[in-house]
Image (spheres, rainbow, N blue to C red):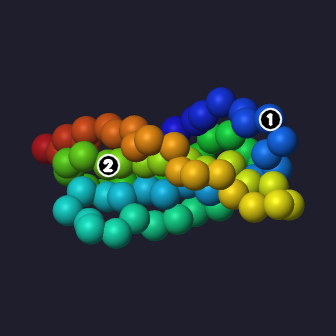
């Protein structure tokens, strides 16, 4: 996934929630504006991003989602 740069941001956090999970995992993307994930699941994956700098972090973006289907 990738996202647009936020003025003043030095790092980004990504929260990714896999299908059937109630809590997401927060990953640091550092200064990168994209992140790659390998997910072995079928269903909807939700992701959102927040921008951070030396003062703190922004609110989370709205969720984006993608639907994964089995390779069978």
- Tag 1: Cα neighbours inside 10 Å, few (<14), some, or many (≥20)? few
> Which residue is under mark 1?
7
Residue that lies at the very extreme toward the left in this rendered image: 72
Callout 2–callout 1 Cβ contact below 8 Å: no
Q: Residue at x 32, y 49 (%)?
A: 45
Q: Residue at x 52, y 65 (%)?
A: 26
Residue that lies at the very extreme toward the top in this rendered image: 4
The foreground one among 31 and 8 is 8
Q: Which mark is residue 30?
A: none
Image coordinates for residue 63, horizontal then vertical, percent: 40, 43
Between label 2 and label 1, give the one nearer the viewer: 1
Residue 57 vs 8, above or below: the answer is below
Image coordinates for residue 24, horizontal then vertical, percent: 40, 65
SS for dot 1: loop
The answer to whether residue 12 is seen in the rendering is: no
Disc 2 to disc 1, C-alpha distance:
27 Å
The answer to whether residue 5 is seen in the rendering is: yes
Q: Point out the tag, 2 or 1, that comes first from the N-terminus.
A: 1
SS for dot 2: strand
Locate the C terminus by quadrant: top left
> Which residue is under mark 2?
45
| Quadrant hosting residue 39 | bottom left
Q: Residue at x 82, y 50 (%)?
A: 10
From the viewer's perspective, is 18 left or right of 64?
left
The foreground one among 26 and 9 is 9
The foreground one among 56 and 1 is 56
């Amino acid at each position: 996934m990738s996202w647009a740069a936020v003025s003043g941001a030095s790092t980004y956090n990504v929260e990714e929630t896999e299908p059937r999970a109630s809590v997401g995992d927060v990953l640091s993307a550092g200064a990168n504006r994209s992140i790659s994930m390998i997910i072995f699941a079928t269903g909807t994956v939700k992701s959102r991003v927040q921008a951070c700098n030396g003062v703190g972090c922004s609110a989370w973006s709205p969720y984006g989602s993608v639907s994964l289907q089995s390779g069978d």
